[in-house]
Image (cartoon, helix red, strand yellow):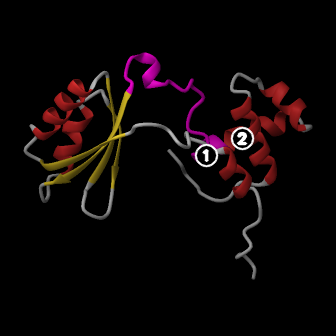
Amino acid sequence: MPTAHGPVDPLDGRLLATMRAHPRIGLTELARLLGVARGTVQARVDKLVARGVIGDFGPTVVPAGMGYPILAFVSLQISQGRLREAVQALEAVPEILEVYGTSGQADLLCRVVARSTVQLQEIIARVLASPAVQRTDTTIALSTQIPYRIEPLLGAAARPDPGIGS
């Protein structure tokens, strides 16, 4: 769980970018590539984990590679005062990968994967079976125009904020 937030410095940015580029790299090799002591790398990694900047060290699993080629975003409107109940119902559906509380027309936004559009329809029906869910709106992703990326943000985060100290 993150304990503190704040910007990353240039060394943290280089460290994170190198770890992303070489996910199986060891700390000794990472230190060599960055030109710093192994202890420095270990301390930085530990601090980044404690701050919640590094979320995990596991492999990135691609649902399409596992037979779930359909990606959809499902917005949900929840009955007043029944958010916890709705979230519990959503947690029981393995194809729901993420759920975010949102502002605007919808209360929750879900990232959902499915083996087919028929299965997607079954997942939505399962979600709607919860009395806590009033309405859904589904958008199917047809293609990925910009895949998940963090490297541009790492570069920007490691630069000083021009608004600070002005």
**Foreground residue among 110 and 83:** 110
**Foreground residue among 121 and 61:** 121
Coordinates of residue 126 in the picture (x, y in percent) = 14, 32
Q: Amino acid at mark 1?
A: Val
Please report contact status of discs 2 and 1: CB closer than 8 Å, yes or no. Answer: yes
Q: Which residues are magenta?
A: 48-69
Local secondary structure at mark 1? loop
Residue 79 circle label: none
| Residue carrying label 1 | 53
| Vertical arrangement, residue 158 with respect to residue 93, above or below | below
Q: Neighbour class for label 2 at 10 Å: few (<14), some, many (≥20)?
A: many
| Residue carrying label 2 | 16
User: Horizontal placement of 128 versus 157: left or right?
Assistant: left
Coordinates of residue 1 in the picture (x, y in percent) = 50, 44
| Image quadrant where residue 151 sits | top right
Coordinates of residue 69 in the picture (x, y in percent) = 39, 25
Mark 2 → mark 1, Cα distance in angstroms? 9 Å
Closer to the eye: label 2 or 1: 2
Q: Amino acid at mark 2?
A: Leu
**Foreground residue among 63 and 100:** 63
| Vertical arrangement, residue 77 with respect to residue 111, above or below | below
User: Horizontal placement of 66 versus 53: left or right?
Assistant: left
Coordinates of residue 94 in the picture (x, y in percent) = 29, 27
Local secondary structure at mark 2? helix
> Which residue does the image show at 78% across and 27% down from the upper left?
27
Q: Main secondary structure of the magenta part?
A: loop
Which comes before the other along the chain, label 2 or label 1? Answer: 2
Q: Any magenta on residue 66?
A: yes
> Which residue does the image show at 56% across and 33% down from the upper left?
56
Q: Residue furthest right?
A: 35
| Image quadrant where residue 164 sits | bottom right
